Image (cartoon, rainbow, N blue to C red):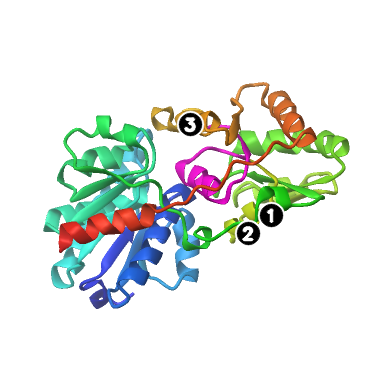
Amino acid sequence: MEEQRFAGALVFTGGGTGGHYFPAVALAEGAQARWPRRPVAFVGAQRGIESRLLPLSPYDHVLVEVEGFVGRAPLKAARAFLLLLRARAGLVKVWRRHRPWAVVGTGGYGAAPALLAARALGIPYFLHESNAQPGALVKLLAGRAAGVWCGMEAVRRHLPQARCVPCGTPVREAFLRPFRPAADLRAPWRLLVLGGSGGARALNEAVLALAPELLDRCPDWELLHQTGSASFPDLEARSRHPRHRVVPFLERMDLEMEAARLVITRSGASTCAELKTCGRPCLMVPMPGSAGDHQLVNAQAMAAEGRAVLVRQTPGLKASLMEAALAVMADLPPAAAPEPNDAVARCLDDLERQLA
C-alpha cells in the first residue's frame, strides 16, 4: 500500500490463525459501514493466514517479516526478536509522517510490530482478547491501551491494570443474518469437521481413521473436512470413504456451517462465537496446552449452555470421538437457538467514545 494511506486510518492488526484474523476482519467491516470515509488498513505478518487472505481482500495492507518467539529455542527466539524490532522501527518511521487515527490489535505475533509502534508514538490503540486467559502480547500492552475489549468476562481478573470493556467476540458480517434452522435440514446430513485454518494434526488423523466405519454405520450422512493447508496434501492423497471430502480451507464458513447438521471442531473463541450465532450443535475437542487452557474453558462453557459435547484429546481420541459422534448422529438433538452477536457494535461504540 502507499504509505500516505496510513494517514488518518484505522489500522487493524492480528493474525497467524483465523482466531486472530477473522475478528479483525469483522471489526474492519463494521468500521467501514460506520465511518465510510475513514481509511481502513491492515498490518499483518508474511506468514500465517493473513498473508494469503489479505491480498484477496479489499483492504490496503502491509505484511511485515516477523515470527513468534515465545517458547522457541534461544537462537530462534533471538532472531524473532530482532525481526520484531526491525518491523516496529519501519512502522514508526512511516507513521511519524503518516499518523494513523488508531490501531486495533486482535492478537497473534503478527500484531506486535504495529501495536508496539503505536505505543511508541502515542497513537491510541485498542486490544481485543477473545479468551478467558489473555495472551502474552495483551498482557504486555494492556496497561497503556485505550481499551481492552473482552470476549469473556473472566479475562478482567488477569488484567487489573487495564480498562476492560466486555464486548463479546466479533463475527464477520456474513454471520450477522438469519440462519436456516438446523431442524429444517434434510438428509443427507452434513458432518462438518474443522481442523482449523492451520490444521490440527491429532484431530485430522482421528477423523480420517474413524470416518470409514462412521459413514458406513450412518448411511444418511456425508463428511466435509477442512484439514488446513499444511495437512491437506498428505490427507488428500490417502484412502478415504467415498462420502468423505477433504479441502484445505473453506472460504464461506457461514454457508458451510449453515449446511451442517453437526460440527466437529477445536474450541477457539471465534469458532465458538460463529457456532452460537448460526445455532449449530458441535463436538468440541479442545487443543491441549492452549494458553491458560482457554480452549478447554471455552468448550466447557459451550457444553454448559447445551451447545456442545466436550471430547478430550487423549491417546484414545479416535474411540471417544467415534462414540460421541455416533450418539449424536443416531439421535439428533434439537439445536440450540442462534444467539445474536453485537460484539462489533459494542467495540466500535467504545472506540468512538474514547476518540471523540
Q: Position of residue 252 (x, y in %)?
A: 59, 61
Q: Quadrant of residue 97?
A: bottom left
Q: Give residue 301's mark.
A: 3
Task: Pinpoint residue 127: horizontal percent, then vertical percent.
Answer: 28, 49
Residue nearer the viewer, 79 or 288: 288
The quadrant where residue 27 appears = bottom left
Say what secondary structure mark 2 lies in. helix
Relative to 230, does residue 251 appear above or below in the rendering?
below
Is 313 situated above or below 225? above
Q: Which mark is residue 259?
A: 1
Q: Kindly state the secondary structure of the residue where label 1 is placed.
A: helix
The residue located at (70%, 28%) in the rendering is 324
Kindly report the distance in space between the C-alpha atoms of the residues bearing marks 2 and 1: 6 Å
Look at mark 2 in the image and give the residue it sits on: 255
For the record, the magenta segment spans 264-286
Determine if the magenta segment contains residue 283.
yes
Name the secondary structure under disc 3.
helix
Marks 2 and 1: CB-CB under 8 Å?
A: yes
